[in-house]
Each structure stands twice: as structure tokens, then as C-alpha cells.
Image (tube, helix red, strand yellow):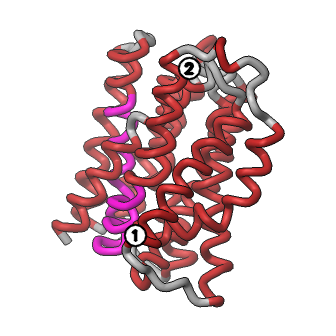
Amino acid sequence: MAEGWGSGLLGVLIFSASLPATRVAVGGFSPLFLTSARAVIAALLGLACLALLRQRRPARADLASLAVVAGGVVVGFPLLTALALQHVTSAHSIVFVGLLPLATAAFGVLRGGERPKPAFWLFSILGSLAVAGYALVQGGLGSLTGDLLMLAAILVCGLGYAEGAILSRRLGGWQVISWALLLALPLMAALGAVTLPADWSRIATPAWLGLAYVSVFSMLVGFVFWYRGLALGGIAKVGQLQLLQPFFGLALAGLLLGEPVPAAMIAVAALVAACVAGAKRFA
């Protein structure tokens, strides 16, 4: 159990920089090209790992689940968040990540057959309501379009997390994300080809660095630890660690991007951290 929580926490730390990095990257790349490029780069890295370590192909029966993973975490979440970040700041979008544990836990029950105790749901819902409530009172910092895109991203990501965790119990965490990336590679490569930037010389270094981070760490390395943690510790249980992700992400948004991080935002992050502790106790 401790090993699962440790692996999951490391995954959360890696994912925490994803939205700030995406915010930087969309300053130089279109959301469609960014989504496709990060998937193609990560898929090629995953292919190299699968080939070097001589991993056997997944069974035909696993292809549908891998398609769900690909649709949720390879295509859906990256594209929807990239589109949302054209309307909201990364600090604002990070708050929505606090809803991921509830979405992941719900899909864990539906797809994984997990049955957490009632007190677990109390803490999970409390943390999620705190996050959602804060987002709703942001006023000028928010955008209805951006908020709806972020909510859609959370739903497809929660499904992708839960489905990937189930597969990881049989295939292994890094194998699942690698095969999902390969499954999406033809579509992502075609999308990238038709959305190539018109002028590469105008893309600044920060945008390239953002693309590199979301391609290598957000799209591949983070999932190695995250799916392993979910598989070992339980989808609903370890998934609550995502409530800490806004806290780490807000700190990065403030430090790296200079975005405003109000005291109320920090208070919400502290509250959801307390909810993680409660959910862990009653999971």
C-alpha cells in the first residue's frame, strides 16, 4: 500500500507542472498541433522502450480498453486543456484538477468494482466542492468557455485514469501508456501534419521547453508512476492524491509564470489537502 501511495505521489508531482507547461507551449503552438506533437513524441519514446525491452503485444480483448485510455489521456485531456488555456490562466485551470479524484474514484467504482466507505465519499466530495466553488467565484479570472472545457477534460481524464489502472494490473503501468500512445499514433501524426506551424522561426524557446516537458514527462514518464500507484494502492484511494496537485501546480504557476496566486486560492489548496488525509483514512 505504501509503495502505491509513494508511486502515485511522484506521478502527481510530475503532472503538477503540466498545465503551466501547456500554458507556455500554447504561446507558440496551436492547441491542435501541441496535442498531436506531444502524443507523437511520447509514442516514439514508448515504442523504443517496448522494442528494447521486448514487451509482448496486448491481447485483442485489451484493445478496447487501450482505446479508452488513448481517448481520455492521450487525446481528450491534452486537447481540451490546451483549448481551455486560451481562455483562462493556468492558475485558474489548475483549480479544476481538484475535481479529478472524484471523477477517477467514480469511474473506479463503475469500471474497477471498488467500494470505498461512505466517509471516503464525504471527504472526496467536500474537497471537490471546495475546488468547484472557488472556481465559480473567480469572476474576471474565469471564462465560461474555459471552465466548460476544463470540466470536460476532467471527465475524460478520470475515465482514462481508471481504465488505465485496471489494465496496469495485467500489463504494467508504462506498458499501458506506451501501447495507448501507439494506438493513437496514426491519428496524432496525421493531425500534426495538417496543423504544422506556418513560421517555425517565430516560436520562442519557452514554447519549445513547454512542448518538451508535456511530451516526455506529462505524456509518458508521469504515467509510469501514476498507473503503477493506482494499480498497487487502488484507483479510488490513490486517486485522492490528485487533490494535492492544485497546490503544487499553483506554486509553479506563481513561481515560473508570475501568475497571481491569491490567498483564497492557497486556502482552498490547504482544505483539499486535508480532504486527502481524510479520504486516505477511510478508503
Q: Secondary structure at mark 2?
A: loop
Give coordinates of residue 44: x percent, y percent: 54, 56
Picture residue at 37% right of the left edge, 61% below the top: 224
Q: Is residue 99 left or right of residue 146?
A: left
Q: Amino acid at mark 1?
A: Gly
Q: Is residue 59 left or right of residue 250?
A: right
Picture residue at 40% right of the left edge, 65% below the top: 227
Residue holding disc 1? 173
Q: Secondary structure at mark 1?
A: helix
Q: Is residue 83 magenta?
A: no
Residue holding disc 2? 89
Examine the rendering and report whether any part of residue 114 can be seen: yes
- Residue 87 figure quarter: top right
**Magenta range:** 223-249
Q: Is residue 110 left or right of residue 55?
A: right
Q: Is residue 236 magenta?
A: yes
Examine the rendering and report whether any part of residue 128 can be seen: no
Q: Nearer the viewer, mark 1 or mark 2?
A: 1
Return the residue nearer the eye: 173 or 160: 173
Look at the magenta stretch and give its main secondary structure. helix
